[in-house]
Amino acid sequence: MSAATLPPVVAELTRRRFLGGAAAAGLSLGLAACGGADDDTKAAAADATRTVATPKGRVEVPARPSRVVAINDYALYTMLDLGLDPIGIYSAGEQYVPPTYLDRWRGLPVINDEKVAGELSVEKILALKPDLIIGIDAQKAPYGQLSKIAPTVLLPFTASNGAWRPMAKGTAEALGRTEDLRALDAKLVQRAAKVKADHADALARWRFDLLQGGFDNGQFWTYGAKSNIGDVLGMTGMALARASAAASEQQTVSYENLDRLADADVVFYYTNNDGTPANLGPKLFAQKGFKLLEAVKAKRLIGSVNFLLVSYGTATAALDDLDRGLTRIA
């Protein structure tokens, strides 16, 4: 079988357990020893399937899959949020893994030909004997080969413009865990409400610009209310300043137009895991026009490694970053 290259789509696109098969097997063995009508019921449950809608059409999946390969970060991190470990993952590199997941991520088997950002190995996936494979439709995955190994669900990343909520919902539906996802959503709402209440005065008084250093010399990116980060921080009642308000989702701004950030009281920006400005952020921060911004002079800068959030875990962590930042600068 040939391998297909999977670029780290989520890791820098806008920026990225399973309950034991052993326990289930032990339960089945115990029932078999006893015998009785429950044997047929349990066997039927193990064979039960559901169908889920995907960009490739409707796919029949196990009602409760237990051996899942996640070939994309959206599926991976939602699984971890749900308390489930994939049996195999695609690795774009540890530097792209949000800190909230790092310890668990390090223990997961990688299905790349190389350890970091190599080619997807169909042979490694086959050897894992998965009962479900989950990715996104923006990946150049060998769908024909994968779907012969196990039911393969590609989430509609393209149609949703990379919005994290549809990805989380689609992953939970494929896993048969929609109720668990609703519980995660309720916790996120509660966390946002707590930040809103704790910082009511600052959130009412200040306007915020959300930005990323980007990758193009002389330019950076601002994010608006319809972006993933704007969606989550907006739950606190945060008011956006001019540059982010105009961005809607994401907008490129040149260094020549740094004055668009002039009305921002606070700048919330993307950082590396070590807290330094990510991408070309250091070049942006070194600009004279940036240093003269009122938010910068007043030291009202809040960095977040979770800025390019892709899951409930990173969404909650972004709110935590905002909470700590507002506590520091208020």
Image: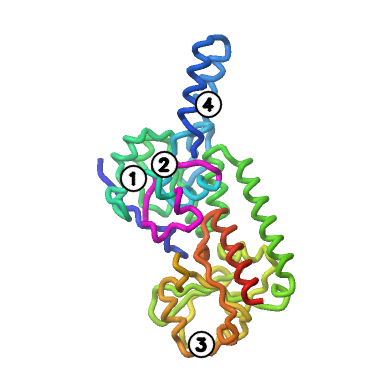
Whichever of labels 2 and 3 marks the residue nearer the N terminus, that label is: 2
Which quadrant: the C terminus?
A: bottom right
Residue 289 percent coordinates (x, y): 50, 89
Q: Amino acid at mark 2?
A: Val
Whichever of labels 1 and 3 marks the residue nearer the N terminus, that label is: 1
Whichever of labels 4 and 2 marks the residue nearer the N terminus, that label is: 4
Residue drawn at x 54%, y 46% as measured from the top left: 170
Q: Mark 2 to mark 3: distance in Å? A: 46 Å
Residue that mark 1 sits on: 111
Q: Viewer-nearest of labels 1 and 3?
A: 3
Q: From which residue to which does the magenta span run? A: 82-104
Residue 268 percent coordinates (x, y): 56, 73
Whichever of labels 3 and 4 marks the residue nearer the N terminus, that label is: 4
Mark 2 closeness class: few <14, some 14–19, many ≥20 residues within 10 Å: many
Residue that mark 4 sits on: 48
Residue at the outermost front position: 328
Q: Viewer-nearest of labels 4 and 2?
A: 2
Residue that mark 2 sits on: 69
Q: Mark 3 to mark 4: distance in Å? A: 61 Å
Labelled pair 1, 2 in contact (Cβ < 8 Å): yes
User: Image height check: is 301 above or below 81?
Assistant: below
Q: Is residue 102 magenta?
A: yes
Residue drawn at x 57%, y 87% as measured from the top left: 297
94 or 49: nearer the viewer: 94
Residue that mark 3 sits on: 291
Q: Is residue 180 magenta?
A: no
User: Image height check: is 274 above or below 80?
Assistant: below
Q: Amino acid at mark 3?
A: Lys
